[in-house]
Structure formats: C-alpha cells, structure tokens
Amino acid sequence: MSAIKQAYIMFNGQKVVAQYDEKTKTWSATTNAPANSSWSQPDHVYKVEIHAVDAANNEATMTSADPTYGDQLKIRVLEKSKPTATIISPTQGSVLGASEQDIVLEMSDAGGSGLNETTVVFTVNGESHAGDLSFTNHEGKRRATYHATGLTDGENTITFQVTDNDGNVSNLATTTFIVSTTAPSLTVNTPTEGLITNSNKLTVTGSTTPGSSAVTIASVKVNNQSVSLTGSSTKKTFSHEITLVEGQNTITVVSTDSIGKVTTVTRHVTLDTKAPIITDVHAEAVTVDAGGRVKITFKVTDAA
C-alpha cells in the first residue's frame, strides 16, 4: 500500500484529484483541456503542477520548471475553429468609377489563438500585396486596408485568406468588381454652335452612349430639366423642345451614367426677332428714261 495518502494536479486553475493504480503503482489525474487555445498563456502553454501528500502530511510539489520532467507539465492546447476572412469593400459585383480604390478587409479569430498576420494571403488581380496592408482594430476584430492604384478598366478580382496561430486556415474570400473610368459619350445634333434664329422654339436633339458595357445611362438633362430617352441600353437618343429668350441663350446638355460619371456639351444660340432698320434712302433720280439706270442707296441697321 502506498504511503502517499493523496495526490492531485492543478491545471488551468482547477484541482484534479489523482487516482492510484495498484497494479502499475502509479497515480493519474484526468481532466478536459480548456475550450480556448493556450496561445495567450505564458510560453503559449497551460502549465501543470503536481502535488503529493504523504501520511505525515509532508507535501511535494513539481512544476513545469522542473529540469527533468518540466516539459511534461507544459500542455499546448490547439483551437480547432477556423478564423474568418471577409472582404468589406469593394463588394461583389460593384461597379466603380475610379482606378484608385481603398480595399478594406476584416478578419477575426474564433478560438483564442489569435491571428498570425504574417501569413495573410492577399492578392489583387493575381499579384500579392500582403506586405502593403495596414492593420487596425475595429469593433473587436482586425481590419486591414490597402490603397489600390492602377486598377484595370473592366473586371478586377481580390482574394484574401488568413491563418491563426494554431495553424487553422480560413476559407478563401474572393470578390470580383468592375472599374469603369470612361465618362459617357454625348453628341448634340441640334442646335449647332452659334446658331442665330428668329423662332423662340428650339428642339435640342442628340444621342449618348455609356463609357463601358458595365454601366448604363441614368439621365440626360437639358438646362437642368430631365428629358425622355429612347433607344437601347448601349445608345440613348433624345429630342426636347425649349423656349429661347431674346438675345444669347446658353444650352447645357448633361449625360450622367449609373455610377455618376458626367459628360457636358454646351451650345450658344441667339434669338433675334427684330427686323433690320432701313434708313437714309436716296434715289439717284426719281425720273428716268425708259431703259435708263435706276440706282437706290440706303442704310440698313441690325435692330438686335
């Protein structure tokens, strides 16, 4: 019979009583590992203490600092949950109007080991930019930002993945978005620049097309008034009547696409409804022979 009356271990703040096996002459204590990773603990391990008390109440203690058995008292607990990796912006399928964009990523750890930011996988159109990320804390998670320049007109793809300190790898996050930097084309057929007319009614006509297939024409305005559009998604036409005022008129036509890109065409038209003034009329002779010369001189002044 053992002279030891009690043995136990202290593990993660809990006392676990050991059981004696007469056959093997050994004590053993069994408990469950903590739910969270040991990464945040000193030396990244949970440390165990063994306590043994004999019949005379003498107590022996062994810790993880023991030179012979200390390594057996350092328990590394690995979490099994994957971290999460999310692309906040741009969003999937979005259409953006500039080749420079701030890309925002978010990541979080599920089981306490923490994120290993040195293992982040981040690509833009297949090119790695993990080393260019800036990391910040945001509402209990980690965010990473990258200012992208020179994005391709058309389709662009981002990939993002992160690993925690216990080696768990997140799912690969992927986002594809469109860049469209070309403003709409806008043609004003009528009026022509510098037109002079004596009618106060004028029809403004023309057509407009989006800068790329990823966008559509949202509106056309003539002097800040929205006009009706006809045609297909690739080309819109318009015809809109306006009223001129006497003198010079400025006509501004603005085409706006679905992501806010704008093209403007301006025409200047003059309305002149006043007839010229004729003065200083003089006949060389008011009586002439048949077949003779008739000469009239006069002055004309534009009344406008």
Image (cartoon, helix red, strand yellow):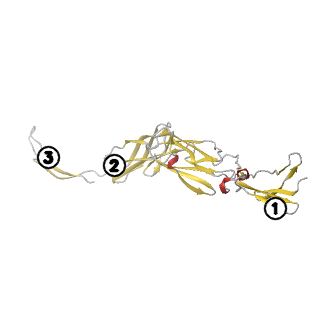
As rendered, which of 268 and 185 lies closer to the eye? 185
User: Given the image, on which type of amino acid does mark 3 rest?
Assistant: Ile
- Marks 2 and 1: which is nearer the front? 1
The image shows residue 112 at horizontal and vertical percentages of 68, 53
The image shows residue 158 at horizontal and vertical percentages of 54, 42
Q: Residue sitting at 46 percent across and 50 percent down?
A: 225
> For numbered disc 3, what is the local secondary structure?
strand
> For numbered disc 1, what is the local secondary structure?
strand
Q: In the picture shown, does residue 138 fall above or below 260?
A: below
Q: Is residue 91 left or right of residue 25?
A: left
As rendered, which of 273 and 148 lies closer to the eye? 148
Number of residues whose C-alpha sits closer than 10 Å to that of mark 3, classed few (under 14), some (14–19) or many (20 or more): few
Res. 59 mark: 1
Task: Answer with mark 2 or mark 3, whichever residue precedes in sequence.
Answer: 2
* Quarter of the figure with the C terminus: bottom left
The residues bearing labels 3 and 1 have C-alpha atoms spaced at a distance of 140 Å
- Marks 3 and 1: which is nearer the front? 1
Number of residues whose C-alpha sits closer than 10 Å to that of mark 2, classed few (under 14), some (14–19) or many (20 or more): many
Q: Is residue 244 left or right of residue 41?
A: left
Instruction: Spot the residue most to the right.
Output: 1
Number of residues whose C-alpha sits closer than 10 Å to that of mark 1, classed few (under 14), some (14–19) or many (20 or more): few
The residues bearing labels 2 and 3 have C-alpha atoms spaced at a distance of 35 Å
User: Given the image, on which type of amino acid does mark 1 rest?
Assistant: Glu
Task: Answer with mark 3 or mark 1, whichever residue precedes in sequence.
Answer: 1
Res. 269 mark: 2
Q: Residue sitting at 57 percent across and 46 percent down?
A: 120
As rendered, which of 168 and 105 lies closer to the eye? 168
Res. 296 mark: 3
Task: Answer with mark 2 or mark 1, whichever residue precedes in sequence.
Answer: 1
User: Given the image, on which type of amino acid does mark 2 rest?
Assistant: Val
The image shows residue 55 at horizontal and vertical percentages of 88, 60
Q: In the picture shown, does residue 138 fall above or below 193?
A: below
